[in-house]
Amino acid sequence: MTPRGILNVDKPEGITSFQVVARVRKLSAVKKVGHAGTLDPLATGVLLVCLSHATRVSEYLMELPKTYRGSVRLGVATD
């Protein structure tokens, strides 16, 4: 039986959403794998990865409300 469903992947900083999908594809041996929305390579956060038949709902998942959190450090200068 082919694995199917939606994985909540905690994407670390420094890799792309495409790289996450490629790793899931390799580990699961599922050919049809996609993500519901792209996270910047420098961002961390939850990336929804859809397997098999679940890829059909990715467009609806992307329409759901999202929450973004960030932190600001005042009084620091960088080059």
Image: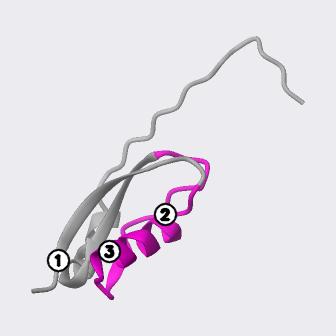
* Amino acid type assigned to the residue bearing label 3 in the image: Glu
* Amino acid type assigned to the residue bearing label 1 in the image: Arg
Q: Residue sitting at 70 percent across and 14 percent down?
A: 74
- Measured Cα–Cα span from mark 2 to mark 1: 20 Å
Task: Check the image and report above or below for 29 versus 17.
Answer: below
Foreground: disc 3 or disc 2: 2
Q: Residue pushed farthest top?
A: 75
Q: Secondary structure at mark 1?
A: loop
Residue 59, label in figure: 3
Horizontal and vertical percent position of residue 40: 57, 55
Q: Residue pushed farthest right?
A: 79
Query: In this orientation, which residue lies closer to the viewer: 53 or 59?
Result: 53
Give, as a single range, the part of the protein colored magenta: 15-44
Horizontal and vertical percent position of residue 55: 27, 80
Residue occupied by mark 1: 4
Horizontal and vertical percent position of residue 29: 30, 82
Q: Secondary structure at mark 3?
A: helix
Residue occupied by mark 2: 38
Q: Residue sitting at 44 percent across and 40 percent down?
A: 68
**Dot 3 and dot 2 residues touching (CB under 8 Å):** no
Query: In this orientation, which residue lies closer to the viewer: 36 or 62?
Result: 36
Q: Quadrant of the C terminus?
A: top right
Neighbourhood count class around disc 1 (C-alpha, 10 Å): few under 14, some 14–19, many 20 upward: some
Residue 14 forms part of the magenta stretch: no
Q: Residue sitting at 22 percent across and 66 percent down?
A: 6
